Amino acid sequence: MRWLKLLVTLLGILIVGCLMLLGYGFYKKSKNSDWQLNQLFSNKPTISSVVPTVSHAPALGPRSAPSAPPAAFGIATLTLPVGCAVTDVNPDGERAYLTIGPPGHCHRIVIIGSQDGRILGTIKVGQ
């Protein structure tokens, strides 16, 4: 009977620990959508599979507070087809997501690095 009480106690502690880890993961993911659990145990930077990988994109390392404001990158030119225009802009930390419209051949999302003005990728929306 004593071993059964010990087993129930240990499993209860394990369940509480897992719930705490799950809550921590939800908290970190809500603050940074690129966060992954394996970043706790590794120093290697990871890139989310949602953002397309581009060869000229800067490497994403651990995020730290910048000591000085980023330097201005001047003028970034985005060439759009005739009849297309930027319909929405959603800044998100180091990236800005530009929605191009109207729906049809123009509909796409362009991801721009807000630090250097480079186009990191384009997501075309097809019908």
Image (cartoon, rainbow, N blue to C red):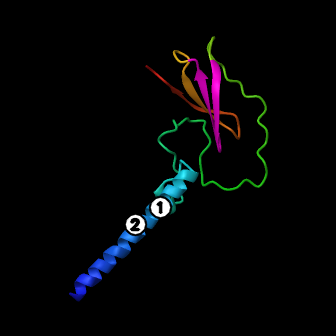
Q: In the rendered view of the protein, which quadrant contains the C terminus?
A: top left
Which quarter of the figure is the N terminus placed in? bottom left
Q: Nearer the viewer, residue 68 or 85?
A: 85
Give percent across and percent down for residue 13: 37, 75
**Can you identify the residue that label 1 sits on?**
23
Viewer-proximal residue, 7 or 77? 7
Which numbered tag is attached to residue 125?
none
First of labels 1, 2 by sequence position: 2
Q: Which residue is mark 2?
A: 18
- Give me the residue at 70% from left, 41% from top: 115
User: Which region of the structure is painted magenta?
Assistant: 85-102
Taking the magenta stretch, the answer to whether it contains residue 99 is: yes
The alpha-carbon separation of the residues under discs 1 and 2 comes to 9 Å
Give coordinates of residue 6: x percent, y percent. Answer: 29, 83
Q: Is residue 42 above or below residue 112?
A: below
Report if residue 122 is visible in the image.
Answer: yes
User: Which residue type does callout 2 highlight?
Assistant: Cys
Q: Amino acid at mark 1?
A: Gly
Instruction: Write the residue at 60% across / 45% down.
Output: 59
What percent of the width, then of the height, locates residue 70?
A: 76, 45
